[in-house]
Amino acid sequence: GSQKTLILQEIPEDGVKKLLSNKECLAACDVAVFLYDSSDEYSWKRSRELLLDVARRGEESGYGVPCLLIAAKDDLDPFPMSLQNSARVTQQLGMEAPIPVGVKLRDSKSVFSRIVSAAEHPHLSIPETEKGKKRKRYRRLVNSSLMFVSVTVGAAVAVVGLAAYRAYAARKNT
């Protein structure tokens, strides 16, 4: 119901590597949108590579960015395996499926609202590589191990304290 302002900045394909060379490049980014031509296999592969580069940089720097894929020219014949490949990649990364856009579909307003929605709820669209998932699992394991050790040590200290108090009380009474 409230008004939102969407400012888009296009980064040419050859400028992404330069952008990602700065460790904090993603800190000021609210959403990364990858637009590819769904009828062109090279376009899809290059978008996927760039998406993975951004996902890795986000994991390394701690500035994970919600990402969206937009399948342009969806009203044309897609290259073979286009839908399966894009669905598989987005599922592996924990993202929503690519947003189809075509001239005949006339649904560009939906694209902008989805971009704004990704910015409002970033945790739902931040891609996670296998390396990032393993790192997260490792951190959880370490945290739960530390929690177990601290609870065990705390219980042992309490038992020793109680035994010492009882020994003290027994000596005092005799």
Image (tube, grey):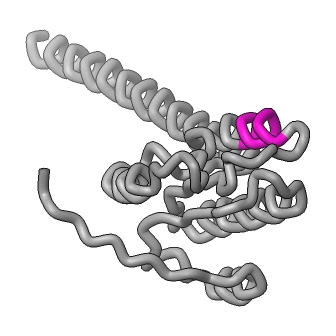
Residue 154, quarter of the rendered image: top left
Q: Is residue 127 above or below residue 42?
A: above
Answer with left or right where residue 147 lies relative to residue 158.
right
Instruction: Identify the main secondary structure in magenta.
Output: helix
Q: Picture coordinates of residue 85 (x, y %)?
A: 81, 39
Query: Quarter of the image containing the C terminus?
Result: top left
Q: Picture coordinates of residue 33 (x, y %)?
A: 56, 63
| Residue 136 part of the magenta-drawn span | no
Q: Is residue 106 above or below residue 59?
A: above
Looking at the picture, tell me which residue is in the foreground, 161 or 17: 17
Q: Residue furthest front?
A: 104
Q: Residue at x 36, y 53 (%)?
A: 113
Q: Residue at x 9, y 11 (%)?
A: 173
Looking at the picture, tell me which residue is in the foreground, 53 or 149: 53
Q: Is residue 5 visible?
A: yes
Q: Is residue 60 above or below residue 68?
A: below
Answer with left or right where residue 39 lies relative to residue 127.
right
How many numbered circles does the render carry? 0
| Residue 87 part of the magenta-drawn span | yes
Q: Residue at x 45, y 25 (%)?
A: 152
Residue 70, quarter of the rendered image: bottom right
Q: Is residue 122 visible?
A: no
Q: Residue at x 74, y 67 (%)?
A: 50
Q: Picture coordinates of residue 119 (x, y %)?
A: 37, 59
Looking at the picture, tell me which residue is in the foreground, 140 or 28: 28
Answer with left or right where residue 27 lies relative to residue 161.
right
Q: Picture coordinates of residue 13 (x, y %)?
A: 74, 79
**Boundaries of the magenta span:** 82-89
